[in-house]
Amino acid sequence: MAVERALAEDLGPEGDLTSSLLPSVDVIAVIVARAAGVLAGRACATEVFRQVDPSVMLRWEVADGDRVSPGQQLAAVTGSRSSVLTAERTALNFLSHLSGIATEVSRYVAAVAGSGRVRDTRKTTPGLRVLEKAAVRAGGGDNHRAGLSEWVMFKDNHLAAITITEGVSAARQRWPERAVYVECDRIEQVDEALAAGADALLFDNMTPQQVLTCVERAEGHDCLLEVSGGITLETVAEYAVTGVDFISVGQLTNSAPALDIALDVV
């Protein structure tokens, strides 16, 4: 669906006017990395070419999750020149965007050095969440919830209308098998969420020292501990060593720079 929408955006209403003027001959093109990074989005790029012209053939030399270097050939594309050029930009947009996410994630994963697990958030491009979360996995990260129906999660705006104790109790009564998360931005909320029996606590916008205090407070309780809010590549290692299970970073999907990838006709 995402590929179909992207092509409709690029080709509507009258198709690729320029490429329609070209001689109908087959060409060989190569998809090449212009910068170092981690590949993601291979299936999307393949689907773009398939939808434009099923006779276009791609031969991939790398897989999602593989590290790539500047000048490295990622795939060979064979088919009609007009079809290859019509599909080019949409295919590269998917590859560059998703590989940029995978590359950014890999940097965070390397920075925590196994001290914690890096997660994404729901701060994704509308309509591309499934693809972006796949890119996070390609970069070595983990996925947070895919949508609002996956589990119960009380955030600050929810807690303006209901107490933590009331919220956890109501969730347990209605959906006894669903996990219940509580976002905490101060120690009193941590204590209340632990007493209420929450399955997971999300420490939001705290300093590493504050997070460490919260982790110590949760000792002996059977719940997941996560930290989020304002965490950067420069600070993620400090949070990872506090003892939390997950570090979630919105920047992984909402502002990762695209990886420079190009297509050249040979």
Image: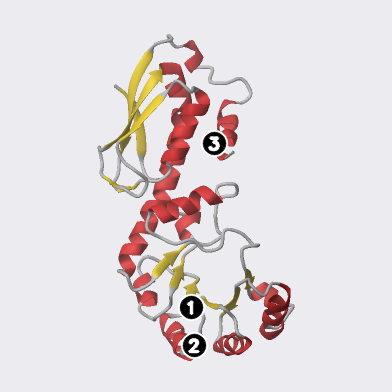
The residue carrying pointer 2 sits among few (fewer than 14), some (14 to 19) or many (20 or more) residues within 10 Å by Cα, namely some
Q: Is residue 246 visible?
A: yes
The image shows residue 262, relative to residue 29, as above or below, that is below
Closest to the observer: 173 or 43?
A: 173
Q: Position of residue 17 (x, y in %)?
A: 54, 17
* Number of other residues with Cα within 10 Å of mark 1, as a class: few under 14, some 14 to 19, many 20 or more: many
Identify which amino acid the numbered label 2 is placed on: Ala
**Looking at the image, do the residues carrying marks 3 and 2 touch, with CB atoms under 8 Å apart?**
no
Q: How far apart are marks 2 and 1 (CA)?
A: 8 Å
Disc 3 element = helix
Instruction: Determine which residue is flagged by label 3.
Output: 3
Mark 2 / mark 1, whichever is N-terminal: 2
How far from the left and from the top, in percent, is residue 61? 29, 36
- Look at the image and name its color scheme: secondary structure
Residue matched to label 2: 218
Residue 235 makes an appearance in the image: no
Q: Which mark is residue 225?
A: 1
- Comparing 18 with 97, the one in front is 97
Callout 3: few (<14), some (14-19), or many (20+) C-alpha neighbours within 10 Å? some
User: Is 68 displayed left or right of 4 in the figure?
Assistant: left
For the residues labelled 1 and 3, the Cα–Cα distance comes to 36 Å
Q: Which residue is drawn at 49% across and 31% down?
A: 48
Residue shown at the point (47%, 90%) measured from the top left: 220
